[in-house]
Each structure stands twice: as C-alpha cells, then as structure tokens.
Amino acid sequence: MDTVLAYGSNLMPATSVGELTGGTVPFFRDVRERLGWPRLGLDLHLEAGVIAACREDPDQIDAIRRALGEAGLGVASINAFPFHSFQSGPVKDRAYEPSWLRRERLELTCAAMDLAAVLCEDAIVSVSTSPGSYLPWGEQANDVKAIAVGFGRAAAHALQLSQRCGKRVILCPEPEPQCTLSTVAQSVRFWGYPIPAFARPAASEILDHDEAAARTAIAEHLGLCLDTCHLAVEFEDPTAAHTRLREVGAAPVKLQLSACPEVHEPGRDRDAVRALRAMAEPRFLHQTTWRNRDGSLTRLRDLDALDPADPALDAADCLRTHFHIPIHRPPQTPGIGSTIDAALAALPGMCAAQPCQLCVETYTWSVLAGDHADRSAGVAAELAFLAEALSTR
C-alpha cells in the first residue's frame, strides 16, 4: 500500500450533515482546485450530530458520498476524536469529552467506524480517537482498566465490521500531551499491561469468548495515530517513537504531520517568550512544555499559564506549545521557530512501514486566518509544500 496523503477536515465546523456538505465539502473543493489536483483526500472529521443523522436516515450517507464525489474529494481516514462542536466556541479540555470511561464514547466510536467502512475508499480504514482521558481531571477519570476495556470492545467491533465489509478497520487512539496516553513511555506501558490484561478479555466477551479472535482484534484492529506536533511538545524523537511503538505492537497507522512553535534558550530571549504567550487564545487547549538543560520537562496546562518573566526559564533550553501552526512556513516573529524540519526528516522512515496514512492537521486555521479564502490558500500551500517535500525525500 502506498502512503495515502490527506488533509484533516476538522478545521471546518461540521455539526450537521448540512454543514458538512454545504461548508466543509465546498471549502476543500476550492483547495483542490487551487492545487490543480484531480482528487484530494480528507481525514474526515465526524461529529456526533453527523453520526446521529446518518444512523437515523441512511440517505444522509448517500448525500455525503455524492457531495464528496462531485467535489473531487475522497475519504482517506476518519477523525473520531472530538465529537462535540470542535469549531464552535471555546473547546479547551471539552475536546476529550466523553472520555473512554463513558459508554457514549464507545457507542459513538463504533458508529463512526461503521460510517468509515462505507465512506472510506481504501482497503485499510483508520479511525483516530481520544487518548483515553485528560490527566488533570484526576486519577479516577484516567482509570486505565476502564479505558483499556473500551478500546478492547471497540477493537472487537472493528474486527466484526471488517469481516462484514471486507476492509480492515483500525481504531487508532491519538496520544496527546497531558492525557492518559501522551508520551511514548506511557503508550508502551499501556500496551504492555492494560491491553493484554483488560482490552483482550473485553474483546473476547464481544467475540463469543473466542480467544484467537480477540488476539486478532487487538493485533490487527487497534493501533495508534501519531501527531508530530504532539510528539514535539513532549520532546519525543519521531523516528525513535515510531520504531519503539511498533516493537511493542502499538503500530502507528495514521501519521498527522503538524508543527508547533518553539523558542530556543527562552531565558535569554524573553521577547520571544512574550510573543509566544501572546498566541494564547480562548478556543483550543495549548499544553505548554519546556525542556530543562538536565533533560527534565516542565509542563503547563495551557499557554495562558506561561509567565514570560518566570526565572525557571533560565534553566530551559527549549520551550514549545501545542499550537498547530502551518507546516509550510515558520511564525513571522523573531525568535519563534517551527518543529517541522524534524517531522519532515522522520517521514521517510515512518512512511516506509505499512500501512501508512498521512494527513496534515492544522485545525487552527480558524483562528489564524480571517476568512475562508485565506484559509483555503493556506491549506493549499501546506499540501503543495508537503507534496514537494515527499517528492524530494
């Protein structure tokens, strides 16, 4: 299977089928036409309203497929991470609701996988999802046993769905800073114990206690979605992360190419730190981390908690924040760089592993650009930049 290139549609509001077909589809048709490409793939974001409408009226699925086809768009993968109003007002930690401790998350995810099997064109269908829960909510809200059980039940559903539709549907939790799954080490530990101890038995219960089928469900229908911005905020090397996760059976199936802003030697460049702090905005959560010279990490829950005068920054060698910035250009502010070069350098190795679905995810265009034309031009520029980078690597 060749690398599948797509763009994440979660930069557009799509709380209903009407918003999806009347807003998201025309937007990406414009992007495709700007590029002069005959076809453009989407990592299609499915919100709860769209899923509910399609379950109640199957004709809505045909409406989505027809709109996509007429616009020259295809569905390469599905984003089933945030389910509620991701681009409508403040989101912050609501992006993680419902967590994988709640049955609503399982039910919505299984319904999203059902839609993915119909909408996606390829034989391998990845569906990204929340990394469990959000660590600041507390230990009880991050019960790894309950989260693993949810993953196991969803993997069993994916296996059953795959047997019916002939496509391999893979659920891919997406590690994110300060979540149940955030670092490579956390993911490795999760695959080392909670997955075999709790996810596999949960899958077995769904699959009539067929242990072989449960092992297949976990091995072939549960993977990971790796986002290079998230890795950068945790100061993880993307190549090493990809290799280590594959070694423990947590295969990264979907790769989200994204970049975050960074300030080197923040203690010596307070103006750059102030400029970074000025990027704080009320819609999205921007977990912020700096690496100290001894290798330890200092984490802040959000960018607005960053104090440019904090004396602790004198011990830091690099400061980064979870703010997805365009991959084709660095911030236009002195002292603030981009992590995109490290992500691009790792792509050949990560894409060599099969399967590999690659998408760009700069959902922050909604706060970076003033109108649809600017956003469309920016998205097209990112895709052109990535296509050129892939061709030279």
Image (cartoon, grey):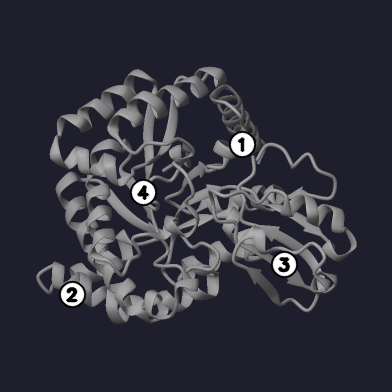
In front of the other: label 4 or label 1? 4
Task: For mark 1, give the secondary structure.
Answer: helix
Q: Are marks 3 and 2 in contact (CB under 8 Å)?
A: no
Q: Residue 290 carries which label?
A: 3
Question: Residue at 60% of width from left, 56% of height from top?
Answer: 286
Earlier in the chain: of badge 2 and badge 1, it is 2
The disc labelled 2 sits on which kind of residue? Answer: Glu
Q: Residue 386 carries which label?
A: 1
Q: Distance between the residues labelled 2 and 4?
A: 35 Å
Mark 2: few/some/many CA within 10 Å (<14, 14-19, 20+): some
Instruction: Report which residue position mark 2 lands on.
Output: 211
Q: Distance between the residues labelled 1 and 3?
A: 28 Å
The disc labelled 3 sits on which kind of residue? Answer: Trp
Mark 3: few/some/many CA within 10 Å (<14, 14-19, 20+): many
Left or right side of 66 for 361 = right
Q: Give residue 134's quadrant in the image.
A: bottom left
Task: For mark 3, give the secondary structure.
Answer: strand
Earlier in the chain: of badge 3 and badge 4, it is 4
Q: How far apart are marks 2 and 1 (CA)?
A: 43 Å
- Using the image as rendered, state which of residue 120 and residue 285 is in the foreground: 285
Q: Distance between the residues labelled 4 and 1?
A: 30 Å
The disc labelled 1 sits on which kind of residue? Answer: Leu
- Residue 146 appears in the rendering: yes
- Using the image as rendered, state which of residue 237 and residue 244 is in the foreground: 237
